[in-house]
Amino acid sequence: ATVLACVVVLLGGYGSALGQQGSSPCATPALPPVLPATPYPSGTHYEAWVDPLWGDDLNGGPGVTAPFRTIQAAADALALLIGTDPLASAVVRLLPGRYGWMDAGSQVTYNGEIWPVALPPGVSLVGVSAQSVMLDGGAVAPTSAPINVPDPTTGLTHAVVPVLHLGGAAGYDYTVISHLTILGADVGALIEGAGAVHAKLASSLVTQCDVGVQIHSTGTAAEGLHRPVLFH
């Protein structure tokens, strides 16, 4: 197994915060472009929106008029639409707000997200801006399932709860994570498994995390190693 790890603080070029927390998505905010790792495939492109205050996972669907409440529900729905089509692509677009688990008595309104979010192959994650979309890894649900990975300093296995989890399969060539902030997590983004992951992380901030991005590639040379690209 090949184990690589890095701590990152990313990146400049936020742009202004668009929209207000809790605003209805009826008025679509201008959004940053999605920058794929390679040009988009020629097949069908799908989008789903997430509104952390007004969204509804039971009634969410593709497009801006029926936003989901959680990132995971939107990502799972898009993964079903993509299926096994190698020419399809999809984007989960995040409206302003705080994403994470909300305990009773919390002074901050969260959307009820359970970390980690398993980002499926072919699904990108794009916020309105890094100033207004906050993925709070410190707001952990009691039901969050830790993942055992090597400690980047000692090499000893330990349990972490990342905010984003990628890997275990091929198909991440078109994945982009951009225009959002990840804070307060054990690991901001965990990339692992045997399938090659070529995702890009752009115009985002990863801060106050024990590890910003951890890469734990268990693939052989023939299967392909992870080669994520961090840029702004």
Image (cartoon, grey):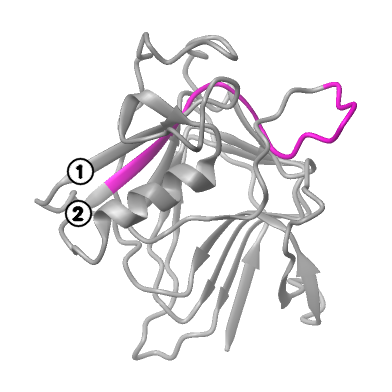
- Which of disc 1 and disc 2 is earlier in sequence? 1
Residue 106 counted in the magenta span: yes
Q: Secondary structure at mark 1?
A: strand
Q: Specify the label residue 62 is tagged with.
A: none
Question: Which residue sits furthest front?
Answer: 58
Q: Nearer the viewer, residue 226 or 58?
A: 58
Compared across the picture, whether 12 is left or right of 220 comes to right
Residue 102 counted in the magenta span: yes
| Residue 83, image quadrant | bottom left
Image height of 126 relative to 200, above or below: above
**In the rendered view of the protein, which quadrant contains the C terminus?**
top left
Question: Which residue sits furthest left?
Answer: 42
Residue 102: x and y in percent read 77, 34
Residue 59: x and y in percent read 43, 33
Image height of 225 relative to 91, above or below: below
Tell me if residue 231 can be seen.
Answer: no
Image height of 16 relative to 118, above or below: above
Magenta-drawn segment = 90-107
**Residue drawn where x is 34% and y is 41% of the image:** 91
- Residue that numbered label 2 is attached to: 88
Residue 8: x and y in percent read 64, 50
- Residue type, mark 1 in image: His
Q: Nearer the viewer, residue 160 or 202?
A: 160
Q: Nearer the viewer, residue 26 or 199?
A: 26
**Residue drawn where x is 46% and y is 24% of the image:** 128
- Residue that numbered label 1 is attached to: 45
Image height of 167 relative to 23, above or below: below
